Every structure is written in C-alpha cells, then in structure tokens.
Amino acid sequence: MTALVVGASSGLGRALASELARRKHDLLLVASGPRDLEALAADLNLRHGVAVRALALDLGREADPGARIAAALEGLSPLSALLLPVGVSREDDDFSLDVSRIGQLLAINLHAPLAIVHALLPKLLETRGVVVLFGSIAAIRGRGRNVVYASAKRGLVSLYESLRQRHRSSELRVHLYQLGFLATNLTHGMQLPMPATDPVVIAKTVIDRLAHGSACWYVPRKFALIALVVRALPWTIYRRMRG
Ligand SMILES: NC(=O)c1ccc[n+]([C@@H]2O[C@H](COP(=O)([O-])OP(=O)(O)OC[C@H]3O[C@@H](n4cnc5c(N)ncnc54)[C@H](OP(=O)(O)O)[C@@H]3O)[C@@H](O)[C@H]2O)c1
C-alpha cells in the first residue's frame, strides 16, 4: 500500500516518511524543493527497499495540486494513507501582510489540504484508508499573531469534522493532531515558552495510530486541557493576555 506525505522534505513530514518506509509502505513524497525531496526518496528506497516517488510542487502557486498528485500516484500500489504535515507560518502574520502573502499562506495551509483531499477521496474510500491532518495550538483562539495561519488551521478542523460527518470510520478514518511546538524549521531560532518536541517521537505515535478509528489528539496531551481553559476565559481577561 502507498502512503502520500505532503510536506515531506523536512521536520515532521520527513520523520513521517522515514517511519512509513521503515514499516514497508510505498511512498509518494511532496514538497516544493526538489533537491531535498529527491535525496530523501533515494535514501529511503535504498535503505528500506520500498518504492518511493518524489513530486516537487509549489503549493503556494499550484491551482490544482490534487490532479498533479493523482497523476503521480499512477503505477504505485493503492493509496491507503494521506498525511498532510505541510505548513508555513510567518513572523509578520500580525495584520501587516499584503494580499499576495495572505493568499500564499491560505494556499499552502488550507487550499492545498482541501484540494488534495477532494481529489484523492475516491481512492482512499476504495482502500478504506486514512486521512491525517495537522492543526496547531496557535489556532485554539484567535490572537493578534499568526492571524492568517491560525485561520487556515481552524479551517482544517472544519475539514476534519466534514470528513467525519460524511464517512463512518469503517469507510474512511480521519485523524487530526493539534500540535504544540516541534523542534523543526518552523520554530527554528524562535523564543518558545516551553521546550519543543522531537518530530521523530511524534511521527512514531502518528504511524502507530494509523489503524485507529477517527479521532482528534492533542500532542503534547496537556494542550487539551490548556485549550479548554483558554477557550473558556472571558474576553475581558483573554484580550489582555500577551503572546
Ligand atoms: N513546528 C511547530 O512548532 C508546529 C506547531 C504546530 C503545528 N505545526 C504543524 O505541523 C506540521 C509540520 O510542521 P513542521 O514544523 O514539520 O514544518 P517544516 O519543518 O517547516 O516542514 C514543512 C513542510 O512543508 C513543505 N512546504 C512548505 N511550503 C510549501 C509549498 N509552498 N509547497 C509545497 N510544500 C511546502 C516544506 O517543504 P519545502 O520547504 O520543500 O517547500 C516542508 O516539507 C505543519 O502542518 C505545521 O503547520 C508545527
């Protein structure tokens, strides 16, 4: 069976691709930069003896990523897992972005997952497969930072609910991870309020759970409680909070 990893060239996506290859899944890997992606595909193929194909796509510019990906899946074993650890955030996403940057953030973080899920849903239903979405604790409640990024990540929560509402777990499993800080490119050089988690640890957990029924998990788990508290705070208190 083939697993598709969108955003596979670094961070969590790279760790997921390695773990999937280790467990003998064939792979289609997608990211914008061809160099890292092709090197990773060659390495995983050599080390684990699985079929690995790389597709370089700039999801910030691609109008129909689903069609390009569907074409790249031709000739591989049937698709049983779609993992979407793709994401981009910006330091200046604080109401100072121009319209093209807003469009780019939405295209990568929301349009691409939506379009890819739409295009591949028939294939995933044929194999009773799994869709894995990655949200962020940055989207628990709207703030003056990560304005567009958090809007897009909230959109993914709605996509998760729509998929679950339409399909029983026996037809299609849908997983949503609400992630805290990871030690990856996205947080490189940032001052974080708590230690970042190793993406390799998260990747193992995600792949261990691939056969589970539809569910949403917070990682680290303590963020489930933090999310509950932050959402329950009255506006008068919440709007005075920094960060
Ligand atoms: N890091 C955190 O602290 C954190 C916290 C909460 C949630 N998350 C979420 O967790 C997921 C994984 O994050 P990460 O930290 O592993 O990110 P990362 O290391 O920055 O990796 C992001 C991946 O997305 C790909 N990507 C970015 N722009 C793209 C584009 N225009 N077209 C195609 N691919 C593109 C990158 O490939 P190229 O560079 O080749 O384009 C890379 O493979 C994301 O959904 C992120 O939003 C991360």
Image (cartoon, rainbow, N blue to C red):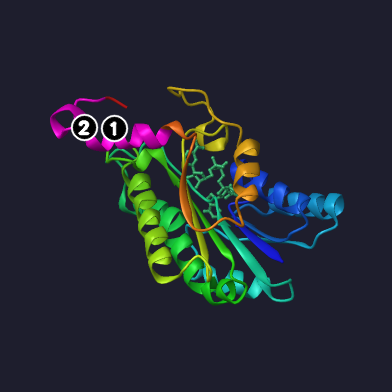
Q: Give the prevailing secondary structure in the magenta stretch.
A: helix
Name the element at disc 2: loop
- Whether residue 140 can be seen here: yes
Q: Who's the residue at 38% across and 60% down the image?
A: 161
Left or right position of 27 against 88: right
- Whether residue 101 can be seen here: no
- Would residue 227 be counted in the magenta stretch? yes
Mark 2 to mark 1: distance in Å? 6 Å
Q: Who's the residue at 23% across and 36% down the image?
A: 232
Q: Which stretch is magenta? A: 223-241
Q: Who's the residue at 13% across and 29% down the image?
A: 236
For ligand 1, tell me if the residue under mark 2 lies within 8 Å.
no
Left or right position of 3 against 177: right
Where residue 233 is drawn, which disc sits there? 2
Circles 2 and 1: CB atoms closer than 8 Å: yes
Whole-percent x, y for residue 87 in the image: 49, 48
**In terms of depth relative to the viewer, which is nearer, 170 or 127?**
170
What's the residue type where badge 2 is placed? Leu
Note whether 18 is above or below 72 in the view shown: above
Note whether 158 is above or below 233 in the view shown: below
Name the element at disc 1: helix
Where residue 229 is drawn, which disc sits there? 1
**In terms of depth relative to the viewer, which is nearer, 211 or 68?**
211
Whole-percent x, y for residue 227 in the image: 34, 36
Quadrant of the image for the N terminus? bottom right
Whole-percent x, y for residue 44 in the image: 79, 51
Residue 141 quadrant: top left
Whole-percent x, y for residue 124 in the image: 57, 71
What's the residue type where badge 1 is placed? Val
Residue 147 quadrant: top left
Q: How many marks?
A: 2
